[in-house]
Image (cartoon, rainbow, N blue to C red):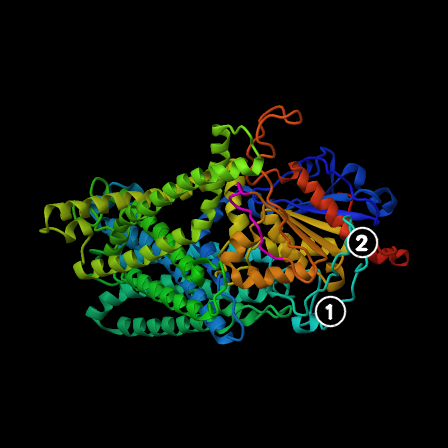
Amino acid sequence: MSPATPDPKGGGAALELLVHGVGGATPADMLDDPRTVRVTGDRTAAVFRRGDDVDAEEHPERYADRPVPEAYCWSNLTSGNGTRALWLLLLPFMVANLAHWMRPPTEGRARLVRLYGVLVRLVALTLTVLLTAAACEVALDLTAWQCAGSAACAGQRSWLGFLSAERAGWWSGPGRRLALAALVPTALVGLLWYLSNRTWSAYEAQRPPMGHDADPEDADPAPAPVLGGDTEAADGTTPAPATPVELRPALGRPGFWYGRRLVARLRAAHTAAGFLTVAAVLAAAAAGHDHRAGGPQELLGRLLQGALAALALVVLWVVCRRGRSEHRLDLRIERALVSWLPAGALLLLALTAVHTGWSRPGWTSAGTLPGTGVFGALTLAQGGLVVALAAVALLLHRPRTPRTALYGLGGPATAMLACALGGVMSGGVAQRVADWLDGTGTPGTGDGPITGPPVLLSWQASVIPVLLLLLLAPAVLLAVRTVLAGRRLRAAVDAAYGASDPDRLRTDQIAAARARAALTDSAPGLVGVVSGATLLLGAASVAGAWASGNVPGRAFDGAHPAIASAATAAQALGSWMIGFGFLLFVTLGRRAYKDRSARRTIGILWDVGTFWPRAAHPFAPPCYAERAVPDLTWRMSSWTACTGGRLVISGHSQGSVLAAAAVWQLPPATRGRVALLTYGSPLERLYGRWFPAYFGPEALRGLHRTVHFWSNLYRATDPIGGPVRVPAEGGRPAVDRPELLDPVVYGRTREHPLPEPILGHSDYQADPAFAAARAALLDRLPPALPRQRDNTDTVQGSSGRSSG
């Protein structure tokens, strides 16, 4: 980071609070000083200062002509220890949670908004059931039912010897084999509950330090008094006064970053749903035999099935009954519900396991495990929910908000991707295990010792090569468009630098960088194509599986040789690809567990995906903003309370999103003493387009009005950041400053004797425009208020200072 130049003059003590972006940054890099001290926080997230600035509050006179730089480092919230690399396996849950926040903006349609949330939560619930069903498929069907029931398969694996039907041991009965194997999916559900509960204790269970308890309608009953309205700016003009809006936007609500109650409810419901899924598989397996044999066991089985259905309805009621409570801090926890629902489901699972394991003479395992049709039912349910979600989104998106991704269908498209990811991961596990157990045979063709996974999974794997072929056309189109756009941009590049004798190679490099950066704006179209194709191909796979009852390679026997060969090739290639996809996830997770650099790279995914609270899926990775936003809000409030001074919060990339969310949470009087500097910011380009209800045009214009001043820096070569498109309003200048040149100079100059690199998304502080923008913001802020020395104890307690 380059030293700040020039320094603002006068106005009293000032703080520059730096917030890094995706991937993280070290305090030494952010402060441009190897001697840094942690002044508050812990190893997970902390505020650092230079060693010479530790006592800035005690000597504000030293900082009359320059700000006190502080660095807030939060990267360990998403990419800290190695165990967090395993969060890759929770990717479908995270994507489903994102769909909740992508609803279009609306006013006065509370019922539709509620219905949208209910549908997303139901999609998330099907993902939990799908994951548990996949674990049951591997442990109960492929291993305990098929392989242990086959002498050829069990004979090749000594660890299955005690379960082998040929040995006629105590565990050799199908029911007891299934009851023992049920421990695997049960343990998986318990692990998910444990991870969610542990992260909940570290994030959602902690009350935000600001302690807002009022409803937002009462938070800002009238515009705050003008602060520094007559202060003259550096350019001789009088800045417009800070006028906080009367009603805070959604991200400024007191309970927005406090999801304790909802996460607890959903965690109980999803845990119970997982246990009930395992119990349902066991009950379905035993029911097939008991229905033929009759007797008391059939009656007991029907009673258990009725209890399972009743508890499943309770789970659905819990998921649909209540959404988020944001208007105030909801401190209530329904302890009875949170405790008895998972416990009741686990007890019912234990009773079902005992019933299934009861001795049944003449019961043998052949073919696939009864009840595997759940995969088809889940696929249809997910497709129906996504279609219903799309219909609700279209109704909400009226009138249409400009630049909204996919015309308001970003949420349904993302929910479809979450279902596709869940299908790839669950199908990949089943395919790989089936290939391993089947030896040289091909699962589903009958030429190996086991039958293999359900036919539907083979069909779903077979459509993956078809999907990739369909995506080839838009990929080629985007590549051609990028090349043509780079050629068209040559003239604009030469004009921007005023190159009298342009270097064709240099111009092409800069133009190509700008064209590649513009690909980000094409992402909604590509996501729409992928989601639409996935929905159609998923429906086709269900129809093919149910119509033929056989795997694709056998379903087209007797057809034209070209069609039969294509079906066989698609099945083989799809099986390999779906298994490879799952192995890739495991490999990345294993590498990230051991390699800190790889862990940091994977952590970038969570920087974007886990910004939002867990509103749809409780097993998603935790929301780091529920720690970071209160940290920043409290730090800004404590500085202004301690010194009466000015403050610029400076956010890069994802840090600009955190900074904006923290400013929205500030009390009106504090917001009037804060300036916002964003650079490389995705506030409008990504968040405004994909999350329009929270970062849409109205919300960003409101943020412009509620802070004293806001400036945004961006480059045409930046693939992530961009303009925020907030125009001048009420005497306030437009937020976006002139586009920064990248590189800063075209060729070699006396000041730059070596060619300057194309920086893209990084090193904004190296541009002289950064320091100039920061200095202008500080000069526009009102002068420091007199320091309240008679309240030293309170101020010291609120400042958060520590010895580090």
Label 1 neighbour load within 10 Å: few <14, some 14-19, many 20+: some
Could you tell me if residue 24 is visible in this image?
yes
Position of 709 with respect to 479 (left or right) is right
Residue 681 image position (x, y, % from top left): 58, 49
Comparing 300 with 128, the one in front is 128
- Please state which of residues 9 and 354 is positioned toward the viewer in this rendering: 9
**Image location of residue 512, percent across then percent down:** 46, 37
SS category of the residue bearing label 1: loop
The x and y percentages for residue 394 are 42, 68
What amino acid does circle 2 point to?
A: Glu
**Residue drawn 52% across and 52% down?**
685
Quarter of the image for residue 495 reads top right
Query: Would you say residue 384 sits in the magenta stretch?
Result: no
Residue 553 at x, y percent in the picture: 17, 49
On the picture, is 706 further left or further right than 401?
Answer: right
472 relative to 332, above or below: above
Query: In this figure, which residue is indicated by the disc labeled 1?
Result: 223
Q: Residue sitting at 42 percent across and 64 percent down?
A: 273
In the rendered view, tell whether residue 406 sits above or below residue 576: below
Predominant secondary structure in magenta?
A: loop
The amino acid pointed to by label 1 is Pro
Residue at 43% x, 38% y is 487
Q: Quadrant of the N terminus?
A: top right
Q: Which residues are magenta?
A: 716-727
**Quadrant location of the C terminus?**
top right
Q: Is residue 263 left or right of residue 138?
A: right
Foreground label between 2 and 1: 2
Residue 354 visible in the shown view: no
Depth order, front residue of 225/489:
489
Residue corresponding to mark 2 = 232
Q: Residue furthest right?
A: 790
Give the residue at the far left of this rendering: 558
